[in-house]
Image (cartoon, grey):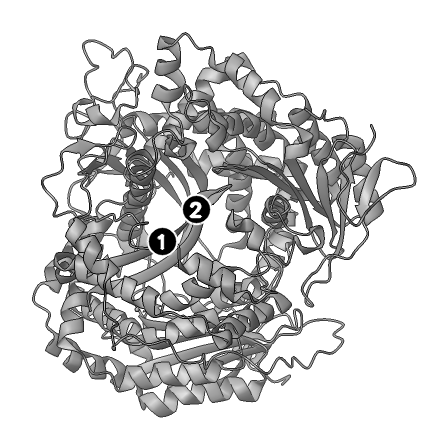
Amino acid sequence: MAFTNLPPNFEISPDGSHAVLTVPLEKSDNDDRNYKLIRLSNDLEALLIQDVNTDKSGAALDVHVGNLCDPDTLPGLAHFCEHLLFMYLSKNAGHSNAYTSTDNTNFYFEVGKEHLEGALDRFSQFFISPLFDPNCKDREIKAVDSENKKNLQDDGRRINQILKSVLSNPHHPYSRFASGNLLSLGNNAIEQGIDVRDELLKWYDKYYSANCMKLCVLGCESLDQLTQWVVEKFSVWPLPDTREYYESKPVSYYSHLISHEGWANKFYVSTGDGAIGFSFFKATMSLTPEGLDNYREVIKVVFQYIKMIQESKWIFREDQDIRNIKFRFAEKLSSPAKYASTLASNIQLPTKRECVISAPYLIKKYEPKLIKNFMDLLRTDNFVLILISQTFNDLDKREKWFGTEYKLEKIDPKFLEELKNLDSNPELKIPPRNEFIPTNFETHKQEVVTPIAQPYLIKQTPLTKVWHKKDDTFWVPKAFVRIILRSPLAYPTPSHSVKTGLYIDLLNDALTEYSYDADLAGLSYNIGNNNYEGIIISLQGFNDKLPVLLEKIIHEMKNFKVDPKRFEIIKEQVERGYRNSFLNPPYSHSAFHIYYMTHSKIWTIEECLEALKDITSQDIQEFYPKLLSYLHIETFSHGNLFKEEALKLNQIVEDILQSKSLSPSQLISDRATILPPGKRYVYQRDVYDSQDINSAIEYYVQVGDLMDVNLRAKLSLLAQITKEPYFDQIRTKEQLGYLTHSGWRIDILSMGFRFIIQSVKDTVHLENRIEAFLDKLLNIIEEMTEEDYQKEKESLIVKKLEKPKNLYKESREYWEHIKSGLYDFDRINIDVAELRKITKSEVLEFLKNVVHPASPNQKKLSIHMRSQKISSSPQTMMQMPKKPMKNPDEGHVEDHAKVQVHLEDVLELELKPDNEYVDDIVKWKSNKKLGPAPTPVLTIDKIMGIIY
């Protein structure tokens, strides 16, 4: 096939099979990978990446078509197509995923580096010759519907659909429902006489052509080898707006300014979210009750600020410099598949081909006229306003797809006139120059034969422990710092817990003047809770100005003055956060209750809400000095910091706080609840949100001591073997729910195996299906060949031995070992050595004797969060509906209040009689044994920094 419309700087290869970009791709100075961009004769472009250090390979295909191309009669068809294709991919690649946006559908996978060619072959073949098996059509429509049901109570999605369905031009494709459900792809299609599979085939043939596709492949092979594979496997495809300003990014100029923050708790600015030919500028404010009452004044301030902004070259240069620095020292993503997915999508942008890596980062041109042109679009006659509050009662409409109640009004013309004629506001100012932009990037890089394997303790006193590791792998001018301030006053009662949380929230609020600039400059921080032990301070990013930021944070902590007005705002925000957490999806509440019942130190949301009522600003002013007066300080510094610098960071904390040390007895940490052998507990309660049609279960089997290496190896291997058949059985075949998960979990020094399902079906049925799956799992393992068993084992070993791809990932791994108090830095190597010894018969015996419900040793706790829309007795479902519903999942959200969730395939209506129901959790926990507190695995001579 001859080449047509070859872009500039491409040269046809000697064999004529492809064309190659002849100019080098613009990449970060820190990027050691090799790149090659080719174009096949069918116009498919492919970016090839050689990474000799990778232990995983990945690829992604981005198709320049999304839900904007859905037919009017089949909303969600693009998403449905993705589902059918992805169903195949998930069975033929090590790890795969996909997503559908307005104008892109992106498929990606990741495999062990030695398996790339075979995976690429399967990847290409299914796109070239998709099966679209008619037997899978109904099942995948149900999967799409289940995914949509999972999102029905998601406020972000509900508001976005209001923007599309209600506030957009109804004749524009953006106004459509993009997700798809049983109504849009099932019932409506049947009523209109549409064969969904036939329409899908036509749609696929129309849009899935090579000229709309961009491919990215990352492997350890040579670029020539990757080129050969891509040419062989992808050449047979037949041929059938702000993005153009990527070099100057005019929108970045004013989003850079406006995000700097009263009446608003939080203020966010975002751009994009549109599609080809249009984009949005969104200003999102979280208002206080007073701010909601005065929302017009808030809008006026926003437009006053927009009006005040004038083009200024130093602001442009600052934004440009920050972007240059971030690109120059960009690190590798942890996932090759996600990196390939991002770049495959980037190639779709209207950029110069050599800029596909750099375009999202860099600003190259200063174009003040273009900045002004975009500023002129932020007019008072060119905006929509969405107000969201639980206090609105006079809502007279309901959005079709998500069931969101709303009221539509025209903005008062008098108010619009006021906005047009606003006076300047002297209280608004352009922010000052950013003091956190780094200028020193020296890393003192040197050749290292064997990197140091762990951090070392470089200081230990009754008051403090200081851990440190100088980066000798990534050589970037960045650091990762964590500081735990442990205090026995942080969480002994719900009141103490809430006061600690309020103090942290007030601090973060007071430090806002630093946080935005620091974040822009690539230096982020957070002050948060540390697992009911105290306060954790996290800093990461460019290390040059990190000590400056830390000193400001600690100084504010020590000298904090509680502003009564800000306290009331933050208190209301915390209360709203507590109440909103009741609306979280059911599976998250199942997970919380497992955590609550298996940990000794934790308070419920209800307890915290009750404690919050009477707390005053004066209470916080008096509380926090006591909180900080006696502490144990543990610091970890990793990255571009020498030992002396790490000690200085810790000294900043000690010198400013002036805390006294705790006694060892005050440092007892949280402990795990130990379930008795042979006991099978069930805790059942209604989902908090009465409108949520979903129920959820977490089925947890406690296995034993985390420090038992053999047990740990068997559990992790069983989890590896279980993952694929569980997904296939529970989600794909039985269609029990879109959200399913299996795996192991750790609770202090206890570990166990868990299964999660969120579904519109009853939790009693879900538990019985989980136990039926465990029966099936016995047969799966018994019939597994030794070759397949060894493949599963090796796959797990490869995952465990995967090297961190960047400084942050490596730091997080070290930090988990420190924070746990175990200091077991060599755990992975110990686990791998043990895994190599484990036989299939040992895994089978472990499943039979420990995990399986028929075992007299099983220690099981299941949490049932049951939708209030399921009508049943308190503990079991005893009856089927008298008349099965014709279309029980029909998806008309308007009728959700009337829907009785269908039970037509529920066979098991009761749990096994050996289950014991828990009515009072506090009473239940009171007579359970507690496991030990963590103690270090390594002796002091193994962790002290003698080698320093």
Report whether 12 appears left or right of 555. Answer: right
Question: In the image, residue 473 lies at what x, y percent?
Answer: 67, 70
**Residue 324 visible in the shown view:** yes
- Specify the label residue 750 is tagged with: none
**Residue 491 visible in the shown view:** no
Q: Do labels 1 and 2 touch, CB within 8 Å?
A: yes
Which image quarter: residue 942? bottom right
The residue most toward the right is: 14
Report the quarter where the C terminus lies.
bottom right
Residue under circle 2? Answer: 273
Tag 2 secondary structure: strand
Q: How many marks?
A: 2
Report whether 867 appears left or right of 129. Answer: left
**Residue drawn 70% across and 78% down?**
445
Which image quarter: residue 406? top left
Residue under circle 1? Answer: 282
Report the quarter where the N terminus lies.
top right
Question: In the image, residue 382 lies at what x, y percent?
Answer: 32, 49
Amino acid on which the number 1 mark rests in the picture: Lys
Question: In the image, residue 748 lies at what x, y percent?
Answer: 38, 59
Q: Residues within 10 Å of mark 2 (few under 14, many from 20)?
A: few
Amino acid on which the number 2 mark rests in the picture: Asp
Q: CA distance from mark 1 to mark 2?
A: 9 Å
141 lies above or below 151: above
**Residue drawn 17% across and 54% down?**
415
